[in-house]
Amino acid sequence: MTSLLYSISLIFLTLIPLLSLADGGSIGVNYGRIGGDLPSAFKVAKLLKSQGIDRVRVYDTDPAVLKSLSGTGIKVTVNLPNELLYAASRTPSFAYGWIRRNVATYYPHTQIESIAVGNEVFVDPKNTTGFLIPAMRNIHQALVKFKLDSVIKLSSPVALSALQNSYPSSAGCFRPELIEPVFKPMFEFLRETGSSLMVNAYPFFAYESNSDVISLDYALFRQNPGVVDAGNGLRYSNLFDAQIDAVFAAMTALKYDDIPLIVSETGWPSKGDSNEIGASLENAAAYNGNLIKRVLTGGGTPLRPKANLTVFLFALFNENKKPGPTSERNYGLFYPNMEKVYNIPFTMEDLKNFRDERSNNGGGGNDGSVVRDLTPVKRGGNGSGESWCVAKDVGEDKLQSSLDYACGEGGANCRPIQPGAACYDPNTLRAHASYAFNSYYQKMGRVPNACYFDGAAYVVTEQPRFGKCEFPTEY
């Protein structure tokens, strides 16, 4: 009896770390291959195993990659590329053949757990949005025929640009033109099949565009006062949570708050062009390291505190053939020679030795830090010494993102520009942005940098008027 009790005790003690690990979320990586100097797929599989990375997402169904992952126990998400959406949506036999060749052939030795149908389809310049839902249903029916539908789930990664509003998080909502034709039928499908919504979220882009007003510490999960969402009273300690909760709020608004969410891409570049503020080795290490710590140690977002997340980091390697700015080629966690770009943890065991080592270098520039002039503006073109902040004509996209920030993270008083309120008319983006920018500017004591918004605003010394709306001179 004593021996039996001792054995049971050993088993229980062995399970304790496994149980505690299960309390947290899961970390995976995106394995992109747009590079001319990358290691073989079999070397990559060994690298993943050696680092304790047990989830990987690939952007196609390359046979060499899927074969290399066979027998490793690594869970795999494969991708049906955007260019195949049309064929998959129109022809069930095409979907069946695609599943047979690219999924059924490898499963279960290669542990394919999900299929991403398309990627950021709504921003695809070839306009493949209309094919998405039929393609998802045809691919699912093919899985049913192979009796794989219960073990392999379908989704489609969406970019945050699918949101009409993202700030504050409580006001998150999807773009109206996508709700009826795409989001509602997609959410019905996800609910029917027990699948999750995949979202690509990059706090780096928000910080880069608004580094004058977004705290770098807030973007990198470092100690900071946080931001209180005026809509729901929740305090956010990091930008990542705020972005994810904006998606949760948008789902709740459509009454689909029971659907889980997977972050299919997120990351931070270790190098960028001179105008890519915040792209640096130190910031990339801080963002990814602190994110992994936040995910593995458990807990959801302020809006969904019990929703542990599965998060896929972008990306496994620096990819030297990717077009665009320098940052696009420098999201990698590893160099092509498989050396780490910077040291971050991937497992709970690694977390024991992880420290976010902040540089003591001062000043601004490409390390992402921002020097703010806190001297109040003293102007007086109208003889009053007062000044206001208004929007420039810089294009709707930049104005909308800056307006979202001002009314959300920035904490501007945007109640007067809501429908039916005193400053709703004229109902134009520039008028609403001007009111919000000025509210933020006055709140910050009229310091110069408070009226910048990535070049979307400027200071005036004559009181602006839009319709009958009067702009205040204090918050």
Image (tube, rainbow, N blue to C red):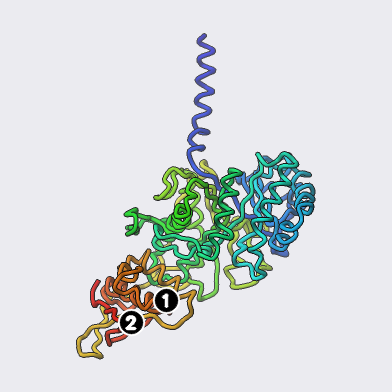
| Spatial separation of the CA atoms under disc 1 and disc 2 | 11 Å
* Along the viewing direction, whichever of 192 and 349 lies nearer the viewer: 192
| Amino acid type at mark 1 | Leu
The quarter of the picture where residue 172 lies is bottom left
Say what secondary structure mark 1 lies in. helix
Q: Residues within 10 Å of mark 1 (few under 14, many from 20)?
A: some
Residue at the disc numbered 2? 466
Q: At 49% across and 30% down in the image, what residue appears?
A: 16
- Position in image of residue 198 (x %, y %): 57, 53
- Position in image of residue 350 (x %, y %): 52, 44
Residue at the disc numbered 1? 429
- Position in image of residue 318 (x %, y %): 63, 62
Q: Is residue 145 above or below residue 221?
A: above
- N-terminal of the pair, mark 1 or mark 2, is 1
The quarter of the picture where residue 337 lies is bottom right
Q: At 45% across and 64% down in the image, what residue appears?
A: 165
Question: Looking at the rendered structure, which numbered label has been put on residue 171?
Answer: none
Quadrant of the snapshot with the C terminus:
bottom left
Residue 239 visible within the image? yes
